[in-house]
Image: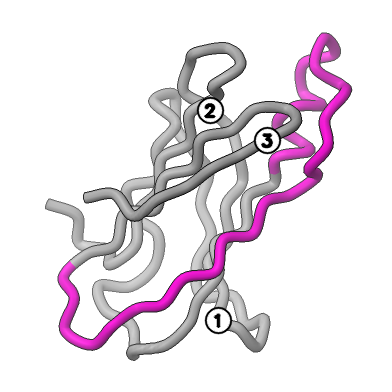
Amino acid sequence: MNASLISTHVLDTARGTPAAGIAVRLQSTDGAEIARGETDAAGRVGELGPESLPAGTYRLIFDTGAYFEQDAGDSAHFFPEVTLTFTVAAGEAHYHVPLLLSPFAYSTYRGN
């Protein structure tokens, strides 16, 4: 089990692979950085931030532009970054926020 309240997983749906090497920042809505990480070879950041956060609204910001530009074959992309804004409720044990990514689209959901 993760010690961090927040984790994420990025899958590159165009390639059908995990998206490794994406910088991810966790911020409060006022822009204060709480934590940062980078997706591993499996596309995961398992420990992103503290074990608990006050109830409220937070953002995960993914540096998707740098990910696509690292491979010269994928220099064309539409979203230089993806920002996911979500609400943390009091008393919740864990939030897993996956990102499904391609050069011209993305989707997300609350995972487990």
Query: Which residue corresponds to the image point at 54% horizontal and 21% vertical from the top-left?
Result: 13
Whole-number angstrom distance, CA of label 2 to CA of label 1? 24 Å
Q: Is residue 43 above or below residue 64?
A: above
Count of numbered labels shown in the rendering: 3
Q: Is residue 105 above or below residue 89?
A: above
Q: Nearer the viewer, mark 3 or mark 2?
A: 3
Q: Is residue 42 above or below residue 72?
A: below
Q: Where is mark 1, residue-wise?
A: 28
Q: Where does the image place residue 103, in percent across and percent down from the top left?
A: 73, 27
The earlier-in-sequence mark between 1 and 3 is: 1
- Give the side of residue 33 with respect to residue 46, left or right: right
Picture quarter containing residue 14? top right
- Label 2 sits on a secondary structure element that is loop
What residue type is disc 2 on?
A: Ala
Picture quarter containing residue 107? top right
Whole-number angstrom distance, CA of label 3 to CA of label 2? 18 Å
User: 76 and 46: which one is in front?
Assistant: 76
What residue type is disc 3 on?
A: Ala
Q: For residue 105, which numbered disc appears in the image?
A: 3
Q: Are marks 1 and 3 in contact (CB under 8 Å)?
A: no
Q: Where is mark 2, residue-wise?
A: 20
What residue type is disc 1 on?
A: Ser
Q: Where does the image place residue 75, in percent across and percent down from the top left?
A: 87, 21
The earlier-in-sequence mark between 2 and 1 is: 2
Within 10 Å of disc 1 (Cα), the crowding (few <14, some 14-19, many 20+) is some
Q: Where does the image place residue 98, in percent across and percent down from the top left?
A: 41, 45
Q: Which residues are magenta?
A: 64-93
Q: Is residue 66 magenta?
A: yes
Whole-number angstrom distance, CA of label 1 to CA of label 3? 25 Å
